[in-house]
Amino acid sequence: MDSTFEKIRGFLAEQLGVEPQTITMDSDLLNDFDADSLDIVDMVMTLEDEFGIEVPDDAIESLHTVGDVVRFVDSHLDN
């Protein structure tokens, strides 16, 4: 899970313009980083490209924290 977190933290820091060390598993994407819907779409596209997974629209609504994103990716990498 750490490597998934590190990858996600890296591209989130770049996309959202924040320092990587400020991103934790408990970080709330919308509230902690002022992400908007376009940022979320960018994140989902990056997840799909980086990890070769598909993120259905209904799953996006459940991705509130960085931990949610990491767990989602890890659960789909195992399949």
Image: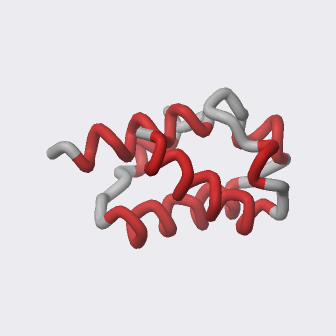
Rendered residue at 34%/42% (across/down): 74
Query: Picture coordinates of residue 17 (x, y %)?
Result: 83, 63
Would you place residue 41 above or below residue 35 in this image?
Answer: below
Q: Quadrant of the C terminus?
A: top left
The residue lying toward the viewer, choosing from 55 and 8, is: 8
- The answer to which image quadrant residue 71 occupies is top left
Would you place residue 77 above or below residue 30 in this image?
Answer: below
Q: Residue furthest bottom?
A: 49
Q: How is the image coloured?
A: secondary structure
Q: Quadrant of the N terminus?
A: top left
In the figure, is residue 27 to the left or right of 78?
A: right
Q: Residue furthest top?
A: 26
Rendered residue at 51%/33% (across/down): 68
In the figure, is residue 28 to the left or right of 53?
A: right
Query: Picture coordinates of residue 61 (x, y %)?
Result: 52, 38
Query: Picture coordinates of residue 53 (x, y %)?
Result: 30, 59
Count of marks placed on residues? 0
Rendered residue at 58%/60% (across/down): 43
Q: Residue furthest left?
A: 79
Rendered residue at 31%/58% (across/down): 54
Query: Picture coordinates of residue 34 (x, y %)?
Result: 84, 47
